Image: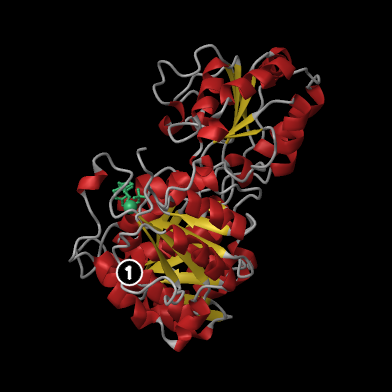
């Protein structure tokens, strides 16, 4: 059957199981848009291409499948860069398709020609220019395989306009990926494996460091069995949250710069760290010269480039986390960890009493309370997509995730503006789940144009803007108010009603959100900078303000 390159692309994506594409049109990708109209694919018109990549990323993170974003050449493609880098640093399987000028114009600085494969070389797992219709099906199939095998990551496929327009025979069978033979998933050196087993069976003060790799390999069950068998407490990275239930007594909570102090103390005092699917990021280790000096280290990791990169380890088990953990379990001798677990309890001490949740109500609204109440109101079952800043860390501390893939956040790149679009992607991936955005007043303004996408697509996403009125996370952030008289956040109060059209009703808050909001109103700071109506007469809008929700220094 003869099809155009553009039609082949749509057919291939359909055959690969794609249902949603997040994109924005332009000249160099127009043939694909013509073909999209005739396909079964649902195209979501974003408001900025950065949003498209975050949506595809959110889609991928919510499901474990591949998210697809599309843009035109030149500015469309360059607008994707931040989203691609975000996906790269958090190992998210995203396929970006960009249009490119016709092949005979390549290299001539033609209108909207940009070398997007050159630009994205260091921030993609793989990228490629396709200039023949005959190569489209195979290249797209390969892109999907590369994006979501081994350590996942973004792949960019740049297709010239003439390749989209040309016609050729479409033969799905003949377009099987021609990739190098799959590497052995587990490449354990027997000596390293034996050393790991010995370290596990002789350690007195071990701690497991659990990262996102556990979720990526679908190792949650194997991990739980490993924890039970070894009887070792678990500290989580930010991106690992959800891979092991927060409610489990063996879960210590988050480690690192924004983790609990006593968790970091326990790590410093440990004699063995077992890092699973994490990469010893600097936010986790702090100063490497003093990091866990008394501990031997085992690293279970699929990407061999991560081994000994930041922290020198004593045993490296390179391979898929699930298979490695399953292989280790039969070798573990059930140890008595009583003294070590009691010591950690002592380290924890009265931290619960000092917790902001336990302080007497002083009439102030604290972000931690908002997030903790949100957790209770949603029974911990929502998919929460956070932005980057203080609110992100409060979410990690006060929303207790028991299920994998229910916290979606930009960890590695720390991309402000991620939350709102990523939540749109997550909602398309999981339409039956309640999706909440927790975003700062700064980050919200970076991609708030995607509110229009929410309304147009009639999707139900709830948004909590943790409005502390400044860029809380950055040092001296208080000097950078986001709420001056002229600020967009202020004018949002004027803009938002424009979205309260009948079509917006689907996006308005649920009764659950209403309960949540009513509960917060009595606690609101009396200064309420944005409120002109009394709490009682206030309607519950789809966007709810939490004024001045910053942590008191008292
Ligand atoms: C795109 C981008 N620009 C700048 C930063 C640096 N940065 C990190 S957190 C932060 C402040 C975020 O402020 P806000 O969204 O209000 O959240 P808060 O910290 O107040 O909760 C800034 C500027 C970033 N992470 N991403
Ligand atoms: Mg803020």
The answer to whether residue 56 of the structure is visible from this angle is no
Instruction: Please tell me how crowded label 1 is: few (under 14), some (14-19), or many (20+) other residues with Cα within 10 Å.
Output: few
Q: Residue 229 appears in which quarter of the rendering?
A: top right
Specify how the rendered protein is coloured. secondary structure
Residue 355 drawn above or below residue 85: above
For this view, does 546 lie left or right of residue 73?
A: right
Which residue is at 47% across, 48% downward?
Answer: 361
Q: As rendered, which of 257 and 197 lies closer to the eye?
A: 257
Residue 477 drawn above or below residue 420: above
For this view, does 483 lie left or right of residue 496?
A: left
Q: Name the residue under label 1.
A: 531
Provide residue 164's location: percent of width, then percent of height.
41, 74
Which residue is at 46% across, 45% downward?
Answer: 394
Which residue is at 67% across, 42% downward?
Answer: 247
Which residue is at 21% across, 64% downward?
Answer: 487
Q: As rendered, which of 421 and 157 lies closer to the eye?
A: 421
Provide residue 54's location: percent of width, then percent of height.
43, 60
Provide residue 449's location: percent of width, then percent of height.
34, 70
The answer to whether residue 389 of the structure is visible from this angle is yes
How many numbered marks, from 0 up?
1
Q: As rendered, which of 391 and 387 lies closer to the eye?
A: 391
């Amino acid at each position: 059957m003869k099809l155009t390159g553009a039609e082949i692309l749509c057919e291939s994506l359909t055959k690969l199981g794609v249902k949603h594409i997040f994109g924005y049109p332009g000249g160099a990708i127009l043939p694909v848009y013509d073909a999209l109209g005739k396909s079964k694919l649902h195209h979501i018109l974003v408001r900025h291409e950065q949003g498209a990549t975050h949506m595809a990323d959110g889609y991928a993170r919510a499901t474990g499948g591949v998210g697809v974003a599309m843009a035109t050449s030149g500015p469309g493609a360059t607008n994707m860069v931040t989203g691609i880098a975000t996906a790269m640093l958090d190992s998210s399987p995203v396929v970006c398709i960009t249009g490119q000028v016709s092949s005979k114009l390549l290299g001539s600085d033609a209108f909207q020609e940009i070398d997007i494969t050159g630009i994205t070389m260091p921030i993609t797992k793989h990228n490629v220019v396709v200039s023949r219709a005959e190569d489209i099906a195979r290249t797209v199939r390969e892109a999907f395989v590369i994006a979501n095998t081994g350590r996942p990551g973004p792949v960019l496929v740049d297709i010239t306009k003439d390749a989209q327009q040309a016609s050729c025979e479409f033969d799905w069978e003949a377009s099987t990926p021609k990739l190098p033979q799959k590497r052995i998933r587990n490449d354990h050196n027997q000596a390293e494996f034996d050393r790991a087993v010995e370290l596990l069976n002789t350690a007195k003060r071990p701690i497991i460091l659990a990262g996102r790799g556990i979720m990526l390999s679908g190792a949650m069950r194997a991990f739980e069995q490993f924890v039970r068998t070894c009887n070792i407490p678990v500290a989580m990275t930010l991106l690992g949250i959800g891979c092991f239930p927060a409610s489990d007594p063996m879960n210590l909570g988050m480690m690192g710069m924004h983790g609990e102090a006593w968790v970091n103390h326990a790590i410093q005092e440990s004699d063995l760290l077992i890092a699973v699917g994490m990469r010893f990021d600097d936010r986790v280790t702090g100063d490497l010269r003093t990091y866990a000096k008394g501990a031997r280290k085992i690293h279970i990791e699929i990407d061999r480039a991560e081994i000994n990169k930041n922290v020198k380890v004593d045993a490296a088990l390179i391979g898929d986390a699930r298979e490695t953990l399953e292989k280790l379990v039969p070798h573990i001798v059930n140890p008595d960890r009583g003294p070590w677990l009691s010591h950690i309890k002592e380290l924890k001490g009265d931290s619960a009493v000092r917790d902001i949740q336990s302080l007497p109500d002083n009439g102030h609204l604290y972000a931690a309370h908002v997030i903790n109440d949100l957790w209770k109101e949603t029974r911990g079952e929502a998919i929460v997509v956070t932005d980057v800043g203080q609110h992100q860390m409060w979410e990690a501390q006060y929303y207790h995730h028991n299920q994998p893939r229910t916290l979606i956040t930009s960890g590695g790149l720390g991309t402000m503006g991620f939350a709102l679009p990523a939540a749109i992607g997550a909602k398309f991936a999981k339409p039956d789940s309640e999706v909440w955005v927790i975003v700062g007043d700064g980050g919200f303004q970076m991609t708030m144009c995607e509110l229009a996408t929410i309304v147009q697509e009639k999707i139900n996403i709830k948004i909590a803007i943790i409005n502390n009125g400044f860029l809380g996370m950055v040092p001296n952030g208080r000097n950078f108010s986001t709420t001056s008289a002229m600020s967009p956040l202020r004018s949002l109060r004027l803009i938002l009603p424009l979205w309260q059209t009948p079509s917006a009703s689907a996006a308005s808050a649920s009764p659950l959100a209403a309960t949540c909001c009513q509960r917060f109103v009595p606690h609101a700071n009396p200064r309420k900078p944005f409120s002109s109506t009394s709490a009682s007469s206030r309607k519950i809008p789809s966007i709810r303000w939490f004024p001045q929700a910053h942590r008191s220094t008292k």
